[in-house]
Image: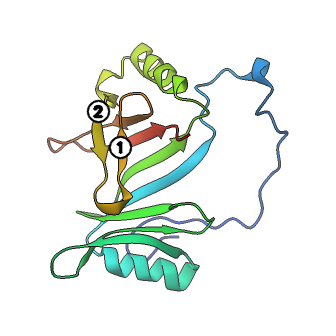
Amino acid sequence: MQDPFGFPIAFYYQSIRHKWLLQDYHLHSSTGIQRVDHCNMLTPDVDGMMRWYMEQLNFRLSEYSADEHNEIWAAWIQRRGSVHDLAMTNGRGPRMHHFAYWVPESSRIFQICDVLGGAREFTAIERGPGVLGGGPGEIITDGQHCLRVGARGNGQRGQYTEVFHLS
């Protein structure tokens, strides 16, 4: 199934409950990614996509950014009470911009860099300082608490993944 803007979507009415392992540290062997935080999509019709998700799927608007002609070029919407679950920014699309994941502490970011380095994925690591996003939804990266991972700029295809810890 896909939305009217060309993005694949899936609906789940049930999930499998698993044992809570958050404090079973002896069982932890991964980089510690705890959950998907949000995803960002590029679309040439931010306003239309934002309105469809709000009207058809009951997303709520967290914030948006408009240009000098009051045309919306970025919007952040949510379903679960967070800052945003889905971000939409103006661009050639439909295409994925990034996924963002939560990690339990900032030291895990360095572990993720080590894993990517060990896998020889050097071009997939973007180090701060830098600014992610634009307008009121900015996240500041300082090289310690945020990492953006994946293909960047120069006409490269693909996406990157943000990995960050917010205290």
Vertical relation: 74 (above or below) 31: below
- Helix, strand or loop at label 2? It is loop
Q: Which of the two discs, 1 and 2, labels the residue nearer the N terminus?
A: 2
The label shown at residue 140 is: 1
In this orientation, does residue 94 appear?
no
Q: Residue at x 45, y 48 (%)?
A: 99
User: Residue 130 placed where, x, y %?
Assistant: 27, 38
The part of the image, by quadrant, that contains residue 167 is top right
Q: Residue at x 53, y 42 (%)?
A: 101
Vertical relation: 65 (above or below) 56: above
Q: Are marks 1 and 2 in contact (CB under 8 Å)?
A: yes
User: Left or right: where does residue 15 sit relative to residue 163?
Assistant: right
Residue at the far bottom: name it: 55
**Residue indicated by mark 2:** 129
Q: How is the image coloured?
A: rainbow
User: Residue 78 placed where, x, y %?
Assistant: 54, 67
Vertical relation: 129 (above or below) 154: above
